[in-house]
């Protein structure tokens, strides 16, 4: 069995954002979030290891790198972990419809 290496809890969310790759950006949706990183849905494939800036609408940007990307989904590991209060605020601001996981 494969071991789950995640150190922090992940929360299902539905957060619109822009993902910046150098001077270009694309609209994306963050579908899960933790202090260490996030999962996102995106319109085009990106190379693992690519440096990116995730910018949720109305919030500060977060730098990180693409860990994997396949079938319209990707994972980002943040350069600096988010603080718990930021994760809590975002998961309550952008809940998944019908989500009752709290």
Image (cartoon, grey):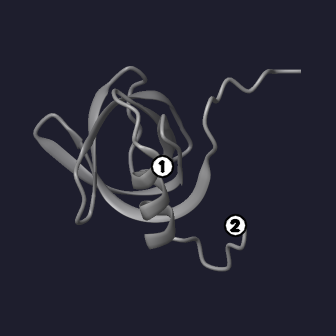
**Residue that badge 1 annotates:** 40
Q: How far from the left and from the top, in percent, is residue 47?
A: 39, 26
Residue shown at 54% from the left, 71% from the top: 95
Q: How many marks?
A: 2
Whether residue 83 is visible? yes
Check disc 2 and report its element: helix, strand or loop. Answer: loop
Q: Is residue 81 left or right of residue 50?
A: right
Q: Residues within 10 Å of mark 1 (few under 14, many from 20)?
A: many
Disc nearest the viewer among 1 and 2: 2
The front one of 83 and 69 is: 83
Please give the label number shown on residue 23: none
Q: How far from the left and from the top, in percent, is residue 89?
A: 43, 63
Residue shown at 67% from the left, 23% from the top: 5
Check disc 1 and report its element: helix, strand or loop. Answer: strand
Q: Is residue 27 left or right of residue 74?
A: left
**Residue that badge 2 annotates:** 102
Q: How far from the left and from the top, in percent, is residue 65?
A: 36, 27
Q: Is residue 100 left or right of residue 86?
A: right
**From the image, which quarter does the N terminus lie in?**
top right
């Amino acid at each position: 069995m494969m071991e789950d290496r995640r150190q922090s809890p992940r929360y299902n969310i539905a957060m619109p954002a822009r993902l910046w790759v150098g001077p270009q950006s694309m609209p994306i949706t963050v579908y899960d979030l933790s202090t260490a990183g996030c999962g996102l849905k995106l319109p085009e494939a990106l190379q693992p290891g690519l440096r990116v800036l995730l910018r949720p609408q109305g919030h500060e940007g977060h730098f990180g790198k693409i860990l994997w990307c396949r079938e319209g989904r990707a994972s980002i590991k943040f350069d600096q972990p988010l603080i718990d209060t930021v994760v809590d605020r975002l998961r309550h601001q952008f809940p998944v419809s019908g989500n009752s996981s709290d």
